[in-house]
Amino acid sequence: MSVTIAVAGKGGVGKTTLCGLLIQYLCETGRRPVLAVDADANSNLNEVLGVEVDMTLGEIREEVARAETSKENPIPASMSKSDYMEIMFNRCLVEDDDFDMLVMGRTQGKGCYCFVNGLLQTQLQKLTPNYPYVVVDNEAGMEHISRGILPKVNILLLVSDCSRRGVQAVGRIAALAKECGLNPDTVGLIINRAPDGKVSEGTMEEIRNQGLELIGVVPHSTEVYEYDCEGKPTVELPADSPVKLALHDIIDKLKL
């Protein structure tokens, strides 16, 4: 039975970095294969993991949409649109040694993401049973929770920075998950980028106000910043990186 871990939080708090390190640690500790899902239209989980993505679900949607109006239809006359899309979906799955990756991507120009969200939901339902662990990096908003795109979540990890506003944001996500009947077995808060790995009393007060369970604190790291600036995959951080060690302790507490 698959264990689905959803990582959520407002933009800019470093949830994608932690998501990538989580995937790496699961693989390193023998809990592979992992299905990594980048459910953010502004996708960059692949950069954290150091893998190339040739095609996204959003790009397939655009290709099929163009085919319907193009004089030179890329879909063979002998093939239905649904069969063609199924073939293309298989190309979206990036296969690495220890994990596979599915990227939502975005559509071009104006318009909503409803169709791509539907594609993501369908593919997750089909692929999830094939993996012991599924890790989903959600968008900065709460759309995937409110629309029920994730069929089941066992563990909801809420990532915030040290600010009260960040904690308030994840508090709203936790409340929405409850309203939508998501009912994860575990909901835990991770404070990321904490100076000296410590959380102020004011932020702790807000955590209590929001009724959240703090399961770990990840220290601020200039090394992570430097890796990002140099375009180096964050998973290549040294094994003794304080960020990695802190996250490993958090994962161990979850007893996955």
Image (cartoon, rainbow, N blue to C red):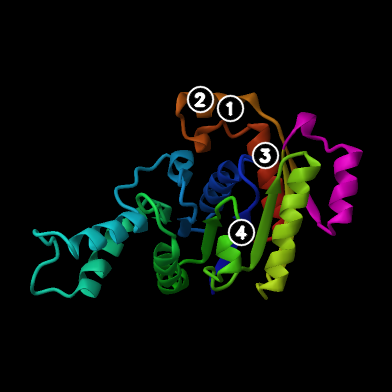
Determine whether 87 is above or below 194 in the image: below
- Specify which label sits upstream in the sequence, 3 or 2: 2
Q: What stretch is highlighted in magenta?
A: 193-216
What amino acid is at disc 1? Answer: Tyr
Q: Which mark is residue 245?
A: 3
Please tell me how crowded label 3 is: few (under 14), some (14-19), or many (20+) other residues with Cα within 10 Å: some
Query: Residue at image x 65%, y 72%?
Result: 182
Q: Which mark is residue 229?
A: 2
Location of the N terminus (image quadrant): bottom right
Is residue 13 part of the magenta span, yes or no?
no
User: Residue 58: x, y in percent?
Assistant: 36, 56
- The residue labelled by disc 1 is 225
Q: How far apart are marks 1 and 3 (CA)?
A: 17 Å
Query: Residue at image x 9%, y 58%?
Result: 72
Residue 92, quarter of the rendered image: bottom left
Between label 3 and label 2, give the one nearer the viewer: 2
Please tell me how crowded label 4 is: few (under 14), some (14-19), or many (20+) other residues with Cα within 10 Å: some
Task: State yes or no: discs 4 and 2 in contact (Cβ < 8 Å).
Answer: no
The answer, for residue 143, to whether it is visible in the render is: yes
Is residue 203 part of the magenta span, yes or no?
yes
Location of the C terminus (image quadrant): bottom right
Q: Distance between the residues labelled 3 and 4?
A: 29 Å
- Specify which label sits upstream in the sequence, 4 or 2: 4
Between label 1 and label 3, give the one nearer the viewer: 1
What amino acid is at disc 3? Answer: Leu
Between label 4 and label 1, give the one nearer the viewer: 4
For this rendering, which residue is in front, 161 or 248?
A: 161
Q: Distance between the residues labelled 2 and 1?
A: 6 Å
What amino acid is at disc 4? Answer: Met
Q: Which mark is residue 142?
A: 4
Q: Is residue 66 left or right of residue 177?
A: left
